[in-house]
Amino acid sequence: MNVEPVVSTIMSTRRTHLELHGMSCANCAGTITDRVESLDGVVSASANYATDEGSVEYDPDEVSLSAIYGAVSEAGYEAASETVTVGITDMSCANCAETNEKALVSTPGVVSAEVNYATDEARVEYNPADASLEDIYDAIEGAGYTPVRGGGDENTGGQGESSDSAQDRQDTAQDRQETARTAEIRRLRNLTLFGAVLSLPLLVMLVDHVFGLGVLPNEVAGVSTGWFAFALATPVQILLGREFYENSYTAVVRNRTANMDVLIALGSSTAYLYSVARLLGFPGEGLYFDTAALILVFITLGNYLEARSKGQASEAIRSLLEMEADTATRIRDDGTEEEVPVEEIEVGDRLKVRPGEKIPTDAEVVDGDSAVDESMVTGESVPVSKEPGDEVIGATVNQNGVLTVEATKVGEETAIQQIVARVKDAQSRQPEIQNVADRISAYFVPAVIVNALLWGALWYAFPGALAGFVTDLPVWGLAAGGPGAVGVFEFAVVVFASAVLIACPCALGLATPAATMVGTTIGAQNGVLFEGGDILERVRDVDTVVFDKTGTLTEGEMELTDVVAFSNAADEPTAADGGGPAPDGGALARPEVTEEFVLEVAASAESGSEHPLAEAIVEGARERGINVEDPSAFENVPGHGVRATTSHGRVLVGNRKLLSDAGVDIAPAEETMDRLEREGKTAMLVALADGSGADGPSAGEGGAGERSEEYDLLGVVADADTVKDSAREAVSALRERGTDVWMITGDNERTAKAVAEQVGIDPDQVMAGVLPEDKADAVDDIQSDGRRAMMVGDGVNDAPALATAFVGCAIGSGTDVAIEASDVTLMRSDPLDVLKAIRVSEGTLSKIKQNLFWALGYNTAMIPLASLGLLQPVLAAVAMAISSVSVLTNSLLFRRYTPDEEYRLLGLFGR
């Protein structure tokens, strides 16, 4: 019997244990099992409803743990996972990030991992049943890099974890990472200064040699100056070069890859070892100790500047967190006050906020009125008036009056913490354009080494032919005077060192994430939150914007504007009390049909509804002094209206379809409805049953179903919603830039087109009478001809449409930023912020392309120059250091952009 295949199968499979959520019966367990087992590479799967647990045996070479989690999610359930962000030091280029990512993903229990070279962070999702934070640390160390370790658990997404403890750990982790970054910057600075001090005499020797000044003697006290150069260069080689040599060994030997450290180590050690060989008698013309040392000094200086730039790029997140208040004035039950740390605030606590103080946490005003500066959170420059019942956002500044507020959200649930989390998530998810850079980086370093070896060999084999060819080119002279001046082998060494040093994969790796960091930060500072860098990229491609009407283009605060009574609606006698049941208990008596009676009937029926239209009717009736009763039975008919039973009888309030389906003749109301709708108002018909059989609803009707009664048309009530001041400007700006603008609403066609006319939307691009559940289909219809639509809605009722659109954009309150269905969240309810989102996206992508052009253009131009022997190795090292710093600087300059106008690149670095 051949057991080798069996052993091989056993050795290659893994078993993972899952904690499952959402199962309600044994069938759920079966559904999960079937879905997971359908994946290629899954050997077996089981789910236990009684214990809410499951296990999966799978081949990691064929299926990933991420795919297994995805299958559970697609089945409609959830497998427990935790997410942690770990800082990583020692990364020198995008290849290092890729190496860490591979090491983490291959760790048993890790679901997914994303490593960002620009932020020096790894964001890891893992299964707590199979992996721990220590395993993640070990994976990073196993790849040859250093994780920023911390005490205790650093989970940011653990099950059953209090928000306060999670927040404390998150703050601690951020502090540790900031400490590690500061220490790294200090270390690089000290190494640069040390290397510069020792290299300064070498630089003097280099200048004297290159320009033939002859100022320096060849010997001092009988000792060749070459040995002095050796004495100065060796400590630099050891202290500054050690990191590059160690990282190169790790990359090549342990990870079977090559990164930027390999190029630096090759270039520097080639110059140093050749010079040592010359001192020991190897034939040649010159020494390159100055080159070997200066290469390491310039590269270390570049790394120092790069580390500082990375810190500046992530300053925005730190500054957001620093905006939070440290303490709060809490009001005790007995009315006395105490000052407490913000961390001790609990939901329901009452807090006093004096003028000039920061609001400690998200809350609701219960007493006082003031103006609050919310610019740091929403980007709104004008202070917002606040009075009892209004929401306030933590970290915003109370300007004049004293406010008493009640905490509604604390810890990581607050808006400022959600903004920070959203921005960090966005920075960890890179645009698709990054894939281009990643593919290039994967082959870049090996290709550079092969190119350097090839040209070194060609110069050694054909020095005369190549020198003649290059000399005929309209360029400067050959480095070191060419092979005729320094010798063929020596010049081949110079070419090799220059060719490996001039290449800069780190510039390529920084091009996208650095710009993405800045772009997402600009968005957050202006009240625009992107779900990820991929969304930031996608928004630029939007060619159609679809607005929901109510609450998006309009204020969403309906007001009762009209009540129209039809006096011929009823001829029955009226009870003496003006209403209520007739003395015989039979048919309901009815008063004269006046506007007051129509409004009383409509408001009493609508008092059971939470719809804005209903609330406006009820509020309008109360303001007019009309008594509004609660209905004894109520039924909401989504998209159409309501059915209710009140003391007046059975009532219908709604659109034409609702009343027509009940057999009501609506013809007498058509002229009135048409007039009101053309004025942009939402008109609703009111009908009352004639009273026959009105002794109460039958059990089978659930209290408010259709009955056999005949309804009389009483009148019409109308609400109006004010169009937002900026709506017309937003629509106009979008259309000017060539973007189609549509509107979807559940309102009737006349009202919808009246509002569309006010804001400047083409009536042919209005979809009216669309029920909430049909909005997703409407968006699909718009996109059916290849359009890439951004759906802009309130994020709750419009969730299916937001998810269906090419980009879902939730517009709403600054305190409610965690809208899962949306790709983009606008902190303010301002349609103009849609334009800001598009501008930030376009600006960021322009900056990314500029960075990539610079990085690729630099390498494309400089590598051939080095290969042709036109660059000294030390100049190649300087250029290499400058290239990555220039890409970061270019991205940091983008921070000055404000999306109030279109972004345009000006000059080399943009504006």
Image (cartoon, rainbow, N blue to C red):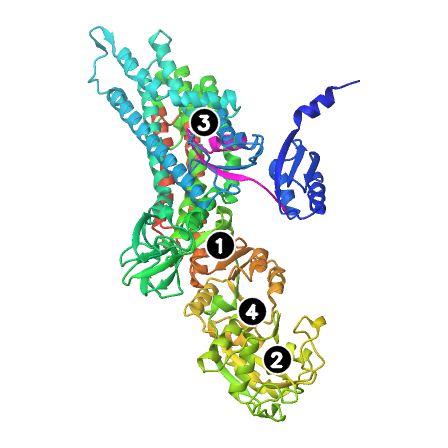
Query: Could you classify mark 3 by the number of other residues whose Cα lies within 10 Å: few (under 14), some (14-19), or many (20 or more)?
Result: many
Three-letter code, disc 1:
Val
Three-letter code, disc 4:
Thr
Distance CA(mark 3)–CA(mark 1): 35 Å
Disc with the residue nearer the chain's start (2 vs 1): 2
Q: Is residue 428 above or below residue 231?
A: below
Q: Is residue 753 left or right of residue 725?
A: right
Q: Secondary structure at mark 2?
A: strand
State the residue position of label 4: 745
Q: Which residues are magenta?
A: 77-102
Residue 849 visible here: no
Q: Quarter holding the N terminus?
A: top right
Residue 604 occupies quadrant: bottom right
User: Is 281 or 835 nearer to us in this picture?
Assistant: 835
Q: Which mark is residue 145?
A: 3
State the residue position of label 1: 824
